[in-house]
Amino acid sequence: MMDNTIVKQSLIQINVGLDSQNNPQHITWSATDSGMEENREVKAFILSLWDKKENNSMRLELWNKEMMVDEMKTFIYQSIISMSDLLNRSTGESELSEDMKDFAAYFAKKADLLK
């Protein structure tokens, strides 16, 4: 039997400064267990959550106007690689994970990320 007792909590915080049209201008994040400086500035983020009750994913994607197109393509490429690694670690589906990495390589080539 698994012990589900919570012995520690960590706070993850994302702050988004908006302009008068509600467009993100300044995005920072911090986490109590991150080991890095508080309120680190970022240009974009993807937050994906699994809703236990609805049995569905929820997502929030934001980026500011400083995010350049090439940076966004690199961000998406790296996110695909990260999701592939997550799939392999969480399910052991190494073949499916490798298929995702193959797609990531295809994406990188089409997005002209390979120099």
Image (cartoon, rainbow, N blue to C red):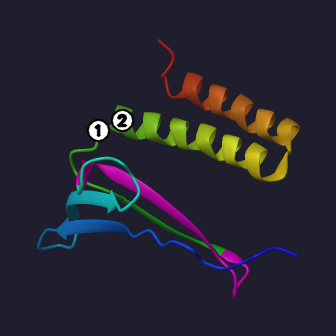
Looking at the image, which residue is at 73% across and 38% down?
A: 100
Prevailing secondary structure of the magenta residues: strand
Q: Is residue 55 magenta?
A: yes
11 sits left or right of 88 in the view: left
Which kind of residue does numbered mark 1 sit on?
Met
- Residue 32 sits in which quadrant? bottom left
Local secondary structure at mark 2: helix
Looking at the image, which residue is at 21% across and 45% down?
A: 66
The reply to whether discs 1 and 2 touch (Cβ–Cβ < 8 Å) is: yes
On screen, 113 above or below 74? above
User: What residue is disc 1 on?
Assistant: 68
Q: Is residue 86 magenta?
A: no
> From mark 1 to mark 2, how far is it between C-alphas?
5 Å
Looking at the image, which residue is at 51% across and 71% down?
A: 8
79 sits left or right of 44 in the view: right
Residue 17 in the image: state x and y as whole percent: 18, 67
Residue 112 in the image: state x and y as whole percent: 49, 22
Local secondary structure at mark 1: loop
Dot 2 surroundings within 10 Å: few (below 14), some, or many (20 or more)? some
Residue 99 in the image: state x and y as whole percent: 79, 35
In the drawing, what numbered circle is on residue 71?
2
* The N terminus: image quadrant: bottom right
Q: Can you name the residue that lies furthest to the bottom here?
A: 53
Dot 1 surroundings within 10 Å: few (below 14), some, or many (20 or more)? few
Looking at the image, which residue is at 85% across and 45% down?
A: 92
Q: Can you name the residue that lies furthest to the left here?
A: 20
On screen, 51 above or below 27? below
Which kind of residue does numbered mark 2 sit on?
Glu
**Magenta residues?**
40-56
Residue 72 in the image: state x and y as whole percent: 40, 41
In the drawing, what numbered circle is on residue 50?
none
85 sits left or right of 20 in the view: right
